[in-house]
C-alpha cells in the first residue's frame, strides 16, 4: 500500500456521461498530481494541485476538470466522455512541489468508456 | 516540445544477468531524475532518484548513471530476477514548470528463467 488511495478501482460508463475520480494523498503530502495512461502510452501529466490551489496544467482537455479540497483530497471530473478517454488514471502525491521529492502513486482507476 | 525519451521499448534478459535501461532527456535545465517501475495492473513505484549535481547513485541492486553532457540517464539492475519484469519509466523534473514530472514512454523488461 503506497498510502495514496484512489477510488473507484474500475469504472465502466457510456459515451457522453460524466464521472468523478477520487484521490486521497499520502498523509502529510500537500501536492496532488493527476496522470493519464492510455494503452501502450506513457504517463501523460494532466494537472497539479498544491494545498488547494492549481499549480500546473498539462495536456488536460477542457472536458476535464479537477479540484483539491481543504482536507487535501482531490477529484478529477471527466465529462462528455468519449471512447478515447478510456485509460488508466493515476493520482500521485508529494510533500511539496519544487523540491527533490519523488511522487508516490496510487494504484489507479481504470476507466472504460463504451 | 518537452520530452524524455527511451532508447528501447523492450528488453529481454536472462535471469541472473545485469540489465541496462537507457533514457535520453531534452531539457538541460532539468535538475532531478527518477526511475519508476510499473508492474501490470499497478501504479508506478519509485526505484531510485538522482540530482543533477551527481553522476552516479546506487541502491540495492540498482544504479542510476547521469551523463549531463549528452543528456543521458541509465538504470542498471544487477543480477536481474523474474520479479524485476515490469515496465520502467524515467522521469524528469523541471522546476520552471511547477515541479511536474515528465515521463518517458517506458521500457518493458522481460526476464527469462
Image (spheres, coloured by chain):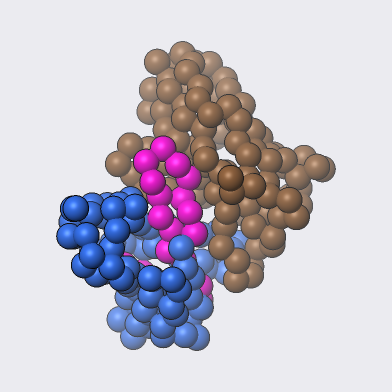
Q: Is residue A63 visible?
A: no
Colour in which the image shows chain A? brown
- Name the quadrant of the N terminus of chain A: top right
From which residue to which does the magenta span run? B23-46
- A76 sits left or right of B53 in the view: right
Which residue: 68% across, 46% down? A25
User: In front here: B92 or A62?
Assistant: B92
User: In front here: A79 or B101?
Assistant: B101
Q: Is residue B37 magenta?
A: yes
Which residue: 46% across, 13% down? A14
| Residue at the right extreme of this rendering | A70
Task: Give the total number of marks visible in the rendering.
Answer: 0
Which residue: 41% across, 28% down? A86
User: In front here: B8 or A9?
Assistant: A9
Rendering coords of residue A101 (x, y %): 60, 66
Rendering coords of residue A39 (x, y %): 33, 37
Which chain comes out blue in the rendered image?
A: B
- Name the quadrant of the C terminus of chain A: top left
Up/down of A97 relative to A81, above or below:
below
Q: Quadrant of residue B74?
A: bottom left
Q: Quadrant of residue B24?
A: bottom left
Q: Quadrant of residue B66?
A: bottom left
Q: Is residue A90 visible?
A: yes
- B110 sits left or right of B100 in the view: left
Rendering coords of residue A22 (x, y %): 64, 33
Up/down of B58 relative to A32, above or below:
below
Q: Is residue B52 magenta?
A: no
Which residue: 77% across, 40% down? A69
Amino acid at each position: 500500500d503506497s498510502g495514496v488511495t484512489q477510488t473507484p478501482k474500475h469504472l465502466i460508463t457510456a459515451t457522453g456521461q460524466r464521472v468523478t475520480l477520487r484521490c486521497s494523498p499520502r498523509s502529510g503530502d500537500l501536492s496532488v498530481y493527476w496522470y493519464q495512461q492510455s494503452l501502450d502510452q506513457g504517463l501523460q501529466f494532466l494537472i497539479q494541485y498544491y494545498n488547494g490551489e492549481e499549480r500546473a496544467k498539462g495536456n488536460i482537455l477542457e472536458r476535464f476538470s479537477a479540484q483539491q479540497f481543504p482536507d487535501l483530497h482531490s477529484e478529477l471530473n471527466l465529462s462528455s466522455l468519449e471512447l478515447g478517454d478510456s485509460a488508466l488514471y493515476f493520482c500521485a502525491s508529494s510533500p511539496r512541489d519544487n523540491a527533490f521529492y519523488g511522487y508516490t502513486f496510487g494504484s489507479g482507476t481504470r476507466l472504460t468508456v463504451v | 516540445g518537452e520530452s524524455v525519451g527511451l532508447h528501447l521499448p523492450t528488453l529481454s534478459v536472462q535471469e541472473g544477468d545485469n540489465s541496462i535501461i537507457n533514457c535520453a532527456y531534452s531539457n538541460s535545465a532539468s535538475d532531478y531524475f527518477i526511475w519508476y517501475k510499473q508492474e501490470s495492473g499497478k501504479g508506478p513505484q519509485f526505484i531510485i532518484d538522482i540530482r543533477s549535481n551527481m553522476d552516479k547513485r546506487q541502491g540495492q541492486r540498482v544504479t542510476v548513471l547521469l551523463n549531463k553532457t549528452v543528456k543521458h540517464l541509465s538504470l542498471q539492475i544487477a543480477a536481474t530476477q523474474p520479479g524485476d519484469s515490469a515496465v520502467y519509466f524515467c522521469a524528469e523534473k523541471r522546476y520552471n514548470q511547477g515541479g511536474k514530472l515528465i515521463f518517458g514512454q517506458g521500457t518493458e523488461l522481460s526476464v527469462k528463467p
